[in-house]
Amino acid sequence: MINIGKILKRAWHILWNYRVLWIFGILLAITGAGRGGGGNGGGGSSGYQGSNGFQGGNPSTNPTIQELNRWFMLNVEPVFVHPEQYIATFVWIGVALFLFILIVSALFALVRYPTETAVIRMVDEYEQTGSKVGFKQGWKMGWNRRAFRLWVIDLVVSLPVILLLAVLGGLGLLVYFSVKNGSQAAIATSAIATIGCVFLFIFAFIVLMVLLGLLRQFFVRKAALENYGIGDSFRKGWEMFKLNWKSAGLMWLVMLGIGIAAGIVMLIIFFLLIPAYIVLVLPAVIVGAIPGLAVFGITSIFASGPLAWILGILAALPFFFLVVFAPLTLISGWYTIFESNVWTLTYREMKALESIAPAELQTPVK
């Protein structure tokens, strides 16, 4: 059985004594591998600092407001009044959003998986040799085929979830058509069956997510630390989990409790850091203005003024929020590194127990 208390203390010690891991933790938090703090509070606080440009007088008589209002009435309002006439527009907007999400996801993946691989390998090497590496050398430890294998592992692990959601969507369509074309009795039966199936699928979805999330900790470390191929990572990871499922389950429960406590603490810290957010507004405006003005300059060549401003603001907002909520991102990164450390140390201890067990079995009884 693994020593959970010892692992938690050691993971905490590594977090505070291996400071270069903080940079990797911030990258993981930004790319969504951690618990992500910056995006939660960005909804509506100070995101429109550009209102300083509308100075004096009634806002409705301001030329900029009037121009924006005219553009909205001419280009946006008809889309909602007669949506059937803008099907092609909706299709192109959908394609553009899909491509945007695809590009951003690819960029995030190029940062996230090398970063995660680097963190796992850096902590493992630190435990083996006691040596620390800098950011450049640590990044090299992550920028290799092992990171690609982690991406493929996540892709394969997500397939059952996608399949379950597809089945749920198909069930929803089936119920919709049966209600649309059926009698009152069929509608009542469909409603009862739908409620039961929804609860069943939600339960199955939660169990599946928990199990896959736990198994992933073993799969990715087989690939990152032992350089196994994708198939072998799944096979060896599953074998390790089967041998240590009690320890793995207990550690998962402990980390679940710590995660809940960390979430409550993060919520408190979010409000305590409000003065820091206010101080960071000006630097955030300066940082966000650079990509915002670049997008505005490029867009204004092909589009009208208000549209160019809107796109410029949309391009600036992610950078604005990234700077404003930088303290929260750092704290989220700390927790992400701590969690990764815990599972890396758990993996190492399980490996050590596996190597000890055969030796004990071979020892002759006197």
Image: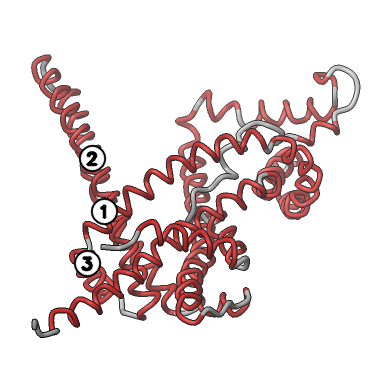
Q: Which mark is residue 222?
A: none
Contact (Cβ within 8 Å) of mark 2 with mark 3: no
Q: Residue at x 55, y 36 (%)?
A: 267
Mark 3, mark 1: which one is toward the viewer?
Answer: 1
Label 2 crowd (10 A; few <14 / some 14-19 / many >=20): some
Q: Amino acid at mark 3?
A: Trp
Q: Amino acid at mark 1?
A: Gly
Q: Residue at x 54, y 39 (%)?
A: 265
Q: Amino acid at mark 2?
A: Leu
Name, please, the residue furthest toward the right.
56
Q: Which corner quadrant of the image does residue 172 belong to?
A: top left
Left or right of residue 53, residue 277 in this image: left
Q: Which residue is mark 1?
A: 249
Tag 2, which secondary structure? Answer: helix
**Along the polypeptide, which appears first: circle 2 or circle 1?**
2
Give 289 or 130, whichever is nearer the viewer. 130
At which x and y percent is residue 216?
32, 61
Q: Which residue is mark 2?
A: 168
Tag 1, which secondary structure? Answer: helix
Left or right of residue 106, residue 214 in this image: left
Q: CA distance from mark 3 to mark 1?
A: 14 Å
At which x and y percent is residue 237?
26, 69
Tag 3, which secondary structure? Answer: helix
From what the image shows, is residue 153 above or below residue 41?
below
Q: Which residue is mark 3?
A: 238
Q: CA distance from mark 2 to mark 3?
A: 28 Å
Q: Which corner quadrant of the image does residue 356 belong to?
A: bottom left
Name, please, the residue furthest toward the front.
366
**Along the polypeptide, which appears first: circle 3 or circle 1?**
3
